[in-house]
Image: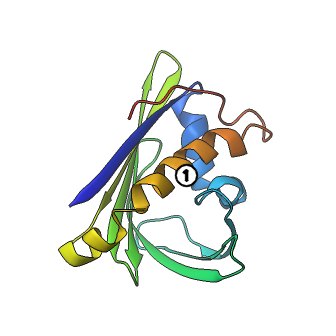
Amino acid sequence: MEFAHSRWYDSPREEVYRAWAQPELLTQWWGPNGFTSTFREFDFREGGSWRFTFHGPDGRDYPNENKFIEIESGERIVLEHQGDPEFRLTATFTEKGGRTRVTFRQQFKDEMIFEQVKSYYPACNKQNLDRLRAGARGTARIITAGKHAA
């Protein structure tokens, strides 16, 4: 059971990947619309932890804890969200003609959890990928406008 989304960005793969791999860039766009985040730990290596809190537009805080499972520089990031709900997130980066396609797969082990989140997670994931484009425009041309692929 998974959600899969992808976007094309008019930037080289190295720049798009950097927006995921550097916490000072990631914190600018990570999350659905209306959310901000505070990173407590970002140990970007296989086995490393990423702990942060989402601050929702409703004023609530949403703690998150992740573990990096696999990192292939410039090509792939796999992490496991630890806690409720548990899932595995895989982001892949493919370049063609100076543009980069990011594919975002979110896999769930528990069918009941998947059924509970399927009404809102896909929209949040799409917003996240859109924010990658919009949120990083002001930071050294990390991501520029692209076209939706899914």
Q: Position of residue 123 (x, y in %)?
A: 46, 53
Amino acid on which the number 1 mark rests in the picture: Asn
138 lies above or below 110: above
Q: Is residue 141 left or right of residue 114?
A: right
Say which element carries label 1: helix
Residue in view at x 26 percent, y 68 percent? 108
> Where residue 7 sits: x, y (%)?
46, 35
Identity of the residue drawn at 42% across and 61% down: 121
How many labels, in total? 1
- Residue highlighted by disc 1: 128
- Left or right: 49, with 131 as reference point: left
Q: Position of residue 14 (x, y in %)?
A: 56, 36
Q: Look at the picture and state if 119 lies above or below 99.
A: below
Q: Is residue 141 left or right of residue 63?
A: right
**The one of 76 and 56 positioned closer to us in this rendering:** 56
- Image coloring type: rainbow
Front in this rendered view, residue 51 or 5: 5
Question: Is disc 1 surrounded by few (<14), some (14 to 19) or many (20+) residues within 10 Å?
Answer: some
**Visible in this render: residue 50?**
yes
Measured along the vertical axis of the image, is residue 116 above or below residue 141? Answer: below
Residue lying at 48% horizontally and 65% vertically, measured from the top left? 45
The image quadrant where one finds the C terminus is top left
Residue appearing at x 65%, y 34% in the figure: 143
Q: Nearer the viewer, residue 137 or 112?
A: 112
Residue 110 appearing in the image: no
Quarter occupied by residue 23: bottom right
Q: Which quadrant holds residue 3?
A: bottom left
The quarter of the image holding the N terminus is bottom left
Q: Residue 21's spot in the image, x, y percent?
A: 57, 54
Residue 30: image quadrant is bottom right
